[in-house]
Image (cartoon, rainbow, N blue to C red):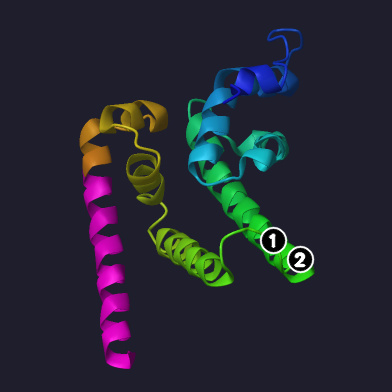
């Protein structure tokens, strides 16, 4: 796999002052994290560069509201939304390709539909998590980061990370249980 740093050149940090310098520093310090996060959040390899660029475009527009020291958390939250959009877009493209070429050796339409439903269900369940617990849940459960890494990335106390992860898991498990109960009643 090609590393993110070999795909896009990093700008020289410190060449400008003010907002441009801050954006350059954020890009330089967090590009690899954003790229990895997008990959782990399910962005197709061919869309990673565009998705990473979109995260930093959003950051450039919202630079005035990104708290100093909270850049990584902001970028990750943005990456979650960009990844979701990229996955939906990829699914639409695949569906269009399937309609155009029925001899395509891709997975069977039923498998694609099942996969799409599973992703949409996961996206829905994760989106329903409270805003304060969602990043911790995604970083731990989907990204595979340790609680110590999450505490550092989001600048939270380790106890806060643990309690938010516990609450997120409880909320997620309750939502899954409700879905299971609904399926058993209707299925």
Residue 136 in the image: above or below residue 184 = above
Residue 148 horizontal side relative to residue 16, left or right: left
In which quadrant is the N terminus drawn? Answer: top right
In the image, residue 161 lies at what x, y percent? 27, 39
53 with respect to 42 (left or right): right
Q: Residue at x 26, y 55 (%)?
A: 169
Relative to 162, 22 lies left or right: right
State the CA–CA distance, disc 1 to disc 2: 6 Å
Determine if the magenta segment contains residue 30.
no
Residue 85 sits in which quadrant?
bottom right
Q: Are the residues flagged by discs 1 and 2 in contact, CB closer than 8 Å?
A: yes
Q: How many marks?
A: 2
Q: Mainly helix, strand or loop, the magenta region?
A: helix
**Above or below, 12 relative to 98:** above
Looking at the image, can residue 136 be seen? yes
Please give the name of the residue rendered at 24% of the width and 32% of the height, measured from the top-left corner. 158
Which image quarter holds the C terminus?
Answer: bottom left
Comparing 133 with 117, the one in front is: 117
Q: Nearer the viewer, residue 104 or 71?
A: 104
> What residue is shown with label 2?
101
Dot 1: element? loop
Q: Quadrant of residue 62?
A: top right
The span picked out in magenta is 163-187
For the point 52% across and 28% down, the residue is 33
Q: Residue 160 at what x, y percent from top left?
A: 25, 39
Label 2 secondary element = loop
Instruction: Check disc 1 and report the residue beneath it.
Output: 104
Q: Position of residue 17 (x, y in %)?
A: 74, 13
Residue situated furthest right in the rendering: 100
- Tell whether position 186 is magenta: yes
């Amino acid at each position: 796999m090609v590393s993110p740093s070999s795909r896009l050149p990093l700008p020289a940090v410190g060449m400008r002052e003010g907002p441009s310098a801050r954006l350059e520093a954020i890009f330089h310090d967090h590009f690899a994290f954003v790229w990895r996060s997008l990959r782990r959040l399910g962005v197709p390899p061919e869309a990673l560069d565009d998705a990473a660029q979109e995260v930093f475009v959003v950051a450039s527009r919202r630079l005035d509201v990104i708290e100093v020291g909270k850049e990584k958390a902001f970028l990750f939250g943005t990456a979650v939304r960009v990844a979701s959009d990229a996955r939906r877009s990829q699914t639409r493209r695949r569906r269009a390709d399937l309609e155009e070429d029925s001899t395509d050796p891709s997975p069977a339409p039923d498998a694609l539909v099942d996969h799409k439903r599973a992703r949409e269900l996961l996206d829905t369940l994760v989106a329903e998590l409270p805003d304060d617990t969602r990043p911790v849940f995604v970083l731990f459960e989907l990204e595979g980061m340790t609680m110590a890494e999450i505490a550092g990335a989001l600048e939270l106390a380790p106890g806060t990370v643990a309690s938010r992860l516990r609450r997120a898991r409880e909320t997620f498990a309750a939502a899954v249980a409700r879905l299971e109960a609904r399926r058993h009643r209707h299925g």
